[in-house]
């Protein structure tokens, strides 16, 4: 029983460290906040070190806590991997499949494909979320995430390139009539540009003087939290935006959006499947990755 209590303390610490909150850890574990706090305190007493700084507003890890958290997360990952290896001996494609993807791409491109996938494997239960923030699949318990562009912070993760999509800078005809059509990147300084929030979402990819892709920070006039909202803003005449061509193809074909700066904006962006090492041997994860990779080869993700 003592060993079980010690393990409970480790698990309580792990969830508290990930959320930096006893309240959030308690909600995830299904126990009370005080029970989480007591378990962590007992763990600290047993180890003889302080793992967490406590304040009225939030928790923070001590240097010893950071080191212990990294070791514990790795150890529990190994346990999960061992269980996954045993479970993978059963090749039945079933269970809950948790996937996270960028909003516009997820709804427009990925969702129809995954519905077909689900119909082929009736034992599967889909759990999909669409947002443009990068999700940590290990911390969030996600089986598979889809990411655009560079794949960073991939410790403990596996990545597989699914396809490449050309990018395009677009605006509505009403905007271009009122403000003119930019003929060069320098012209963008006189225009309204629509972007996402932070990091790569707040920048565009263009061709540099040597033809290689570079990051460009446009003069941002409007910012929105996901790709669908950015496209809607462009349709409404709020400015120019850069998107993967697949997400605006229908609007380009109808003429509601017009492509500009094609000589520098047609930069391919890679689309990756990313999943935790601990999920690698699960039949449902392997199968959906293979399915999406084949769809990528067929051009269904473009």
Image (spheres, rainbow, N blue to C red):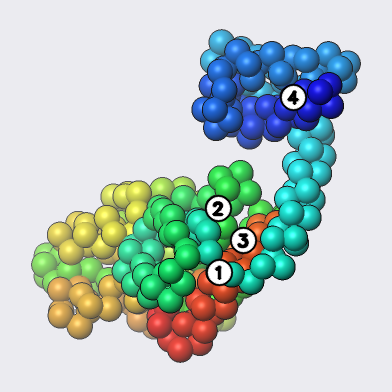
Classify 10 Å Cα crowding around label 4: few (below 14), some (14-19), many (20 and above): many
Classify 10 Å Cα crowding around label 1: few (below 14), some (14-19), many (20 and above): many
Q: Is residue 123 visible?
A: yes
251 or 285: nearer the viewer: 285
Q: CA distance from mark 4 to mark 1?
A: 34 Å
Q: Split into 4 quadrants, where in the image is the N terminus?
A: top right
165 or 82: nearer the viewer: 82
154 or 262: nearer the viewer: 154
Mark 2 — residue?
A: 142
Mark 3 — residue?
A: 275
Numbered tag placed on residue 93 in the rendering: 1
The picture quadrant where one finds residue 174 is bottom left
Question: Residue visible at 59% across and 66% down?
Answer: 285
How far across and down, in percent of the image, does residue 226 sit? 35, 54
The picture quadrant where one finds residue 114 is bottom left
Q: Nearer the viewer, mark 1 or mark 2?
A: 1
Q: Earlier in the sequence, mark 2 or mark 4?
A: 4
Considering the numbered disc 3 on the image, is that residue within a helix, a strand or a loop? strand
């Amino acid at each position: 029983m003592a060993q079980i209590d010690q393990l409970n303390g480790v698990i309580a610490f792990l969830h508290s460290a990930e959320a930096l909150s006893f309240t959030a850890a308690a909600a995830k574990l299904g126990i009370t906040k005080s029970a989480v706090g007591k378990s962590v305190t007992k763990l600290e007493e047993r180890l003889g070190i302080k793992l967490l700084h406590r304040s009225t507003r939030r928790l923070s890890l001590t240097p010893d806590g950071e080191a212990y958290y990294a070791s514990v997360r790795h150890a529990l990952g190994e346990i999960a991997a061992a269980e996954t290896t045993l479970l993978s001996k059963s090749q039945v494609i079933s269970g809950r499949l948790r996937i996270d993807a960028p909003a516009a791409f997820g709804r427009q491109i990925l969702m129809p494909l995954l519905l077909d996938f689900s119909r082929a494997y009736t034992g599967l239960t889909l759990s999909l979320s669409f947002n443009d923030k990068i999700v940590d699949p290990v911390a969030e318990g996600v089986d598979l995430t889809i990411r655009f562009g560079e794949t960073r912070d991939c410790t403990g993760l596996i990545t597989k390139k699914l396809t490449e999509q050309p990018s395009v800078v677009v605006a509505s005809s009403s905007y271009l009539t009122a403000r003119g059509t930019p003929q060069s990147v320098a012209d963008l300084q006189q225009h309204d540009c629509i972007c996402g929030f932070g990091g790569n979402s707040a920048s565009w990819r263009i061709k540099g003087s040597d033809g290689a892709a570079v990051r460009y920070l446009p003069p941002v006039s409007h910012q929105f939290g996901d790709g669908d909202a950015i496209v809607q803003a462009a349709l409404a005449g709020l400015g120019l935006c850069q998107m993967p061509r697949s997400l605006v193809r229908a609007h380009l074909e109808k003429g509601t959006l017009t492509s500009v700066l094609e000589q520098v904006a047609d930069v391919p962006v890679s689309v990756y499947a990313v999943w935790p090492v601990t999920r690698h041997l699960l039949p449902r994860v392997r199968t959906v990755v293979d399915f999406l990779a084949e769809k990528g080869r067929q051009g269904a993700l473009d």
